[in-house]
Each structure stands twice: as structure tokens, then as C-alpha cells.
Image (cartoon, rainbow, N blue to C red):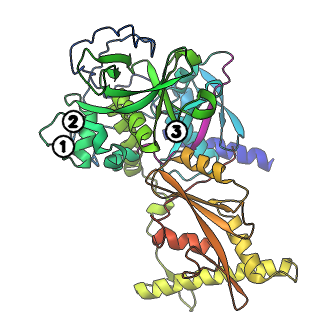
Amino acid sequence: MSAMNDSLDETRSLGEKAAIFRGAKGSGNVVGTAFIPLHSPLQPPNAAVSTLFKGNRKSREVDETQMGHVPNPFPELLPSTVSLVSECLLPWTKNSATQVIKVYSEDNTSRAVEVPSDITARDICQLFILKNHCIDDHSWTLFEQIPHLSIERTIEDHESVMEVQSGWGMDSHCCLYFRKNYAKYEFFKKPLDFFPEHMVSVSSESNGIMNHSQLIQTFLSSSSCPEIHGFLHAKEHGRKSWKKFYFVLRRSGLYFSNKGTSKEPRHLQFIAEFSDSDVYTLLSAKKVYGAPTDYGFCVKASKLNSARDLKLLCADDEQTRTCWVTAMRLFKYGMQLYQNFVQPYQKQKSSPMRSISENSLVAMDFSGHKSRVIENPSEVLSVAVEEGLSWRRKSCHRLSSHGSPSTSQSSMSSIAIHVAQPWFHSKLSRDEAQKLITQQGLIDGVFLVRDSQSNPRTFVLSLCHTQKIKHFQIVPVEDNGELFYSLDDGHTRFTDLLQLVEFYQLNRGVLPCKLKHHCARITL
């Protein structure tokens, strides 16, 4: 009976949180961008290179709409009259048609839920955040994975999940994955890190010197003409070989040059545009497609699910691949992508409910006959430190009373403390750690801690910096019978891994950057 009551309470709480489900399609809150070619239509591909890719060019027009007033974190990018608050109604008051979908997590556990047919990717993420009691840090993402092609992509927050599924074949075994993606909108915060200067050309009067807001504005504005260019490996159509070509990405589509780095219209061959196509990353570029590197991606038409229909490309490094994929997303969705980025923050400001992190927390002293607020900052700090030490001592005592007499208190304490942390992954190999961090976003500060595979007594901190994953060994140090942990050969010592992680979340120390986002796996 209690389980039934819990279920009814959960149903009521979901019903009260109407913001989980957005309004119907066509609500008029979407700003489009006009895709304007930079030059006259190109000549048809010549016979020598037409076998590289096959595709037809399609023209498209998207109407731009005006939006209502809300504050905006990037006033340089959007006019002040922008409304990001969408209509929020319960699914059964909006659309009686429902469907059952299955969603997977990183550990391949799955959960089937019944949802309205017009539900978006953001709605599903919000639903699973509530069901799994996750912290909503705006990084939870829905992914589309196509196993038989070994490709996946981020489903944008505004996309209809049923429309995505309608493009799947009957025997494709496609999946939806719910997991973190810290890099989903990071390019709005640090665009200069995502778009290297040597890969971007902008038609402006800035003489090539632009700040981050100006750079993003060129991508969002239909009147400006940004261009991404550089060398990529391309798989020839119907062959196993890959060749290197000079590519150019513009609003009108993706092209490659059949004469070196020439950008003249007669030398540029059209490959694809993005109105009916999406960009995917290759999960096993070398193994499955014989690519020269593992930094592969592709352009796939929405309704085609055959390997021969993919426009396969491969970069020489992760930064180059990220630049191309990010630019393609921006060119396809334009201002809508920026709306997706700012919408959660706008709802957070307008919501009457406050999260724990938004509440004002004060230090209280309950040691006397009457409680009092501690106002002295130094006293607050000392109390916090003492509370932390007291908590660790209680953990030691609790474990020592149940542990074997031969086990030391310090070692038992350290085991219990770090094993329970979401950033700790015990039996994880180096390759698996790199895959998990890559999946959850290659931005500075994404990390996890794992057991060392080569030395059972040590641990490894795996950390992302400048879109590269680096591994640092955490070495145990014994001093006067006490066990400590260190990243710098004992110069800085910590009694347990939790203390070590907390320190490097606040201090860079010997690391290239602070620990910012931990990789965690959830079970649906």
C-alpha cells in the first residue's frame, strides 16, 4: 500500500510540475534564419571528382519572427525584445495521443515511459531528471544512436522525439540515450575555444579581431557570412579509400575544392546542405569505416539509414572535428539553438520555486542555550572545517566498529568515503574512462577518479583540458603509520580521495585546470 501511495504522490508531483511538457508545435516562438548563398550557383561537379559524394542541392526559406521581452545574457547577440517562455500545459490537456518510448542510460539500463506524441527532447530530459532525482544543471541531453551505422548525435532540445523516431527503419535498432553533455552549449560561453582563428573567415570590418560575442553574432545573424574552412579526410563513394581535400562550410552548404585550396565557384563541388540532414559523430571511425583517425563524423539525410548514404568525413584532431560539427549545428538551427541555451535560465528566473543552491544559507551555532547566527567569516570557516573533520571521525568510528580488527581506521575510512562518491568509478579501464568523458563533453574540468589498472594500490584522476583527456596517478603515501594520498609525490597530502577532489575543485595546483564537472553514471 505504501508503494502505491508513493506512486500516486510521484504522479501528483509530476502533474504539478507542468513545465515538463511544452506547448504544441507551431506556437510561434521559434526564430528562423535565412540561408543565403555567398556566390552564384556552382557548376555541376566534374566527372573526375563526382564519385566522392552524391547529393542534390535544395533551396529553403525560413521566415524570421519577432519575440516578446525578457532579459538576455548576451544583449549584443539578440534584440532586447526576446521571449523564451514557451507555453506549458499537461500532456493530457493538450494532446490525447500518446506513445511509449524506451530510453537508455550509460550503463545500458532502460526505462519505458508513455509520453504525448508532440513531446520534445527537453521535455523527456526534464521527466527523467525528476524520476531519477537528478540535479538539473542544464547539461542533461537526449542522444540518438544508430548502432548498425555506429553513429550518434545530440537531439536538440526543441526537436520532436517522435519525428526523430519516424526516420528510423523497422530493423535499425536505433536507441535513445539519456546522459550528460557538458559541451552541448559551451560554444556560446567560450566560442573562441571552439572556433580556431585559422579555421574561421568572417566578412566584417573587424580585420579578423573579434571578441566572443561578435563571433557568435556572425553565426546567428543571417546578414553576416561566416565560413569554416580546412582540410578533412573524405571517404570516396563506393570505395574503401579515404582522400584529403580542402573543405568549405557556408550557410548554403558544405563544399570541397577540386583544386588545392581554391575557393573559386568553378572549383568548389557541392556535397550537402542541412535542411533535411543531420551531423553525427562516428563511434568507431577506424574500426568500422577504416578512417585514418578516430575523429570521424558524417552528414546523414533524415530519412536514409544506409551506410552508402552517409557523407563520411574525418578530422586530424578533436578540436578540428568539434569546430566542424558545432558550425554545422549553428548553420542548421541558428537562433533556435541560442534560444535552447538561454531558455532554462529564463525559466529559472521566472519560477517562484527556488532550488537549494539558490537559497540563502547561513551558519548557525547550536552549542549554547540559544541558537545564534554566526556572522564572523573566520568563525564560519573554522566551524565548517570542524564539521568536516567531525564527519570524517564519525565515519572512521562507524567503520572500525564493523570492520576487521586488522584493518586500520584510516584505510577503512578512505575506502568508504570515495566509493560512495558519484565521481568514483572503481573498475574502469583507461579506454573506458576516455570514452565516458568524451560522451559527457570535452570541456575543461570534466573528470572522474578510478582504480589504477597497472597498480592496484593507486588511483587515477582522468581530466579533460583543451579537448584532450589526461591521466594523473594518485599515489598513496605513508607517514608515521598514517596513509595519505597525493598527486605531486607527497608535497600536498590528503587523508582521503574526497578531500583531494574537494581541494582541486577549488585550487588548480599541479593540474592544468580545476576539477569542474564530474562524470557520473545513472541507472534508469
Q: Main secondary structure of the magenta part?
A: loop
Horizontal relation, residue 227 to residue 311: left or right: left
Observer able to see residue 15: no
- Disc 3 packing (10 Å; few <14; some 14–19; many ≥20): many
Label 1 near label 2: C-beta < 8 Å?
yes
Q: Is residue 229 magenta?
A: no
Q: Is residue 229 left or right of residue 3?
A: left
Locate residue 325 relative to residue 30 in the image: left or right: right
**Of callouts 1 and 3, which one flags the residue occurring earlier in the amino acid sequence?**
3
Mark 1 to mark 3 CA distance (whole Å) = 43 Å
Q: Residue at x 33, y 46 (%)?
A: 191
Is label 2 in a helix, a strand or a loop? strand
Magenta-tinted stretch: 171-185
Q: Amino acid at mark 1?
A: Gly
Disc 3, SS: helix
Determine the CA span between mark 2 and mark 1. 7 Å
The residue closer to the viewer here, 505 or 238, is: 238
Report whether 451 appears left or right of 252: right
Q: Nearer the viewer, residue 234 or 503?
A: 234
Residue tagged 2? 202
Observer-side mark, 1 or 3, equals 1
Circles 1 and 3 in contact, beta carbons < 8 Å: no
Query: Which residue in the structure is indicated by mark 1?
Result: 208
